[in-house]
Image (cartoon, rainbow, N blue to C red):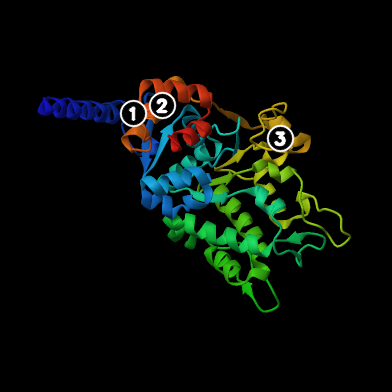
Amino acid sequence: MLASRQTCSLSFRLARLSFYRYYAKTSTDNPSNLTQDDIGKIYQIPLEATKALAFEKILPSKFNKQVNTMDDCSILCRQQFLEVINCLNVVRPSLPSIRVVLWGKFGTGKTLTLAQTIHFAQTQNWVIFNVKDVMNWTRKVKDVQSSVYKPGRIDLPEYSVDFLQHFKQQNQHVWKTLSGLNTERTYEWTKVEKTMQDRPITEIVEMGIASPLVANDCVGALCRELRRHSTSGAIRLLVALDGGNSLYGKTLIKKADRSFAVPEELSLIYQVKKFLKDDWTNGLVLMIADKREVVDARDTLAVPIDTPIELFTEQGFEDIDPFIPIETKLYSENEARIIHEYYKEKNWLITEEARSDKGLRELHYLAAYNPYYFERLCAFN
C-alpha cells in the first residue's frame, strides 16, 4: 500500500514537472527569439545578466526579494514585452528616434517590462541609458548646488555620480565599443580639468565619477555624445526612464528665494529631456507613465488616472508626441495559472490549500488578476 502511494506521488510530481517544462516555459530563454507562441509562458534571465545590469536597483523591491529567495529570475513573456521588442526591431539610423510609453494600472508589470527590455538591449549590444527612477531626482532631495555652466540651473552632484556609475555598470558589454568613440570637441570642466577633443567618450564617464562637482556637466556631455554617435550609426541607443512623467511633475527642491524649482531648472532633467527631440536617430526612448507623481499609486478609490495624456500633463504630452502607447494589462486566466504552477514548482506556495485548484481560484478572486497583488498573496500562502 505504501509503495503504491509513493508511486502515485512520484507520478504526480513527474506529471507536474512535465507540465511546467513543456507548457509553462518558453521555447527559448533568448528574448530576441521569443514569438507570439511564447506569450503567457515563463523565460529565465541568467543571474549573471541581472547582476551586470544592476537589476537589484531597478526591479520592484518585492520581486527583487523573490529573485534573491529563489535564486532565479524568471519572468512571464507578455504581449506588452513583444510589442516593445517590435519597436526596437524597426530602429534605423535613417529614422528619428522612437518614443514608447508604457502605461497601465498599478502592479500590471510596467517596471518589469522595462527591465526585460534592458536585458534584451544587452543581448543585442545596444548602449543602455537607464534612469532608475526620475521621481527620485525631483522628490528625494540630496546634495544640490548652483550650476556653473548655466546660471539659474540646479545641479545634483550625488545623483549625477550615481547615474554615471550605473551607466558604466550596465554597459560593460559595449564598453570597448564606447571606448572607441571619440569626443567631438574639448570639454572644460574646471580651469584645470579638461577632456580633450578626439578622446574616448568613456573618459567623460570616468571624469564625472571621480569629480562629483563636475559630474552633472559630464552627464550633459555624455548625453550629447551618445545622441551624436547614435545618429552616425556607430551605436544603437536605448533610453529607459522609469517614472518618465516626473520629467513634467513637481519637485521638493527649493531655490535661493525659497520657492520650489520646476523640473526644467534641474540640469539632469533638462539634459534628459533632450532625448525627446527629433534631432537624433537610431535609438528608442522607453518611458513609464506612473501615477505616483500625482496620486498614491495604490489608491483604488480615487478616479483612475493612468493614461499618458493625464500623467504627462499637456506640455509633456506635446513634447513626447508622436509616441507609441503600450498598455500593461491584468493577468489572463492562463497567465495566472502559469505563474501559479511556477510558484508551486519553486515551493513558493507552502500550504496545500493554496497549491490546489480551489486555492488558485481563490487567489484569482482576491487579486482580481492583478500581477502585483497575486504575487503578494502567493508570498503569504
Q: CA distance from mark 3 to mark 1?
A: 35 Å
Residue tagged 1? 24
Residue tagged 3? 311
Q: Residues within 10 Å of mark 3 (few under 14, many from 20)?
A: many
Residue 371's disc number: none
Quick one: which residue is furthest to the bottom in this view? 192
Q: CA distance from mark 2 to mark 1?
A: 8 Å
Residue 49 appears anywhere in the view: yes
Q: CA distance from mark 2 to mark 3?
A: 29 Å
Residue tagged 2? 40
Q: Residues within 10 Å of mark 1 (few under 14, many from 20)?
A: many
Is 37 on the left or on the right of 261, as rendered?
left
Is 177 on the left or on the right of 148, as rendered?
left
Provide residue 370's location: percent of width, then percent of height: 53, 28
Residue occupying the point 57% across, 45% down: 240
Task: Check whether the beta carbons of the residues at disc 3 and disc 1 lie within 8 A of each other.
Answer: no
Judged from the image, the secondary structure of the residue bearing numbered disc 1 is helix
- Amino acid beneath label 2: Gly
Task: Check whether the beta carbons of the residues at disc 2 and disc 3 lie within 8 A of each other.
Answer: no
Provide residue 300's location: percent of width, then percent of height: 66, 29
Q: Nearer the viewer, mark 3 or mark 1?
A: 1
Provide residue 286's location: percent of width, then percent of height: 58, 40
Q: Residues within 10 Å of mark 2 (few under 14, many from 20)?
A: many
Q: Quadrant of residue 52?
A: bottom left
Sequence order check: which comes first, mark 2 or mark 1? 1
Residue 34 appears anywhere in the view: no
Q: Quadrant of residue 8?
A: top left
Above or below residue 263? Residue 39 is above
- Amino acid beneath label 1: Ala
Q: Quadrant of the C terminus?
A: top left
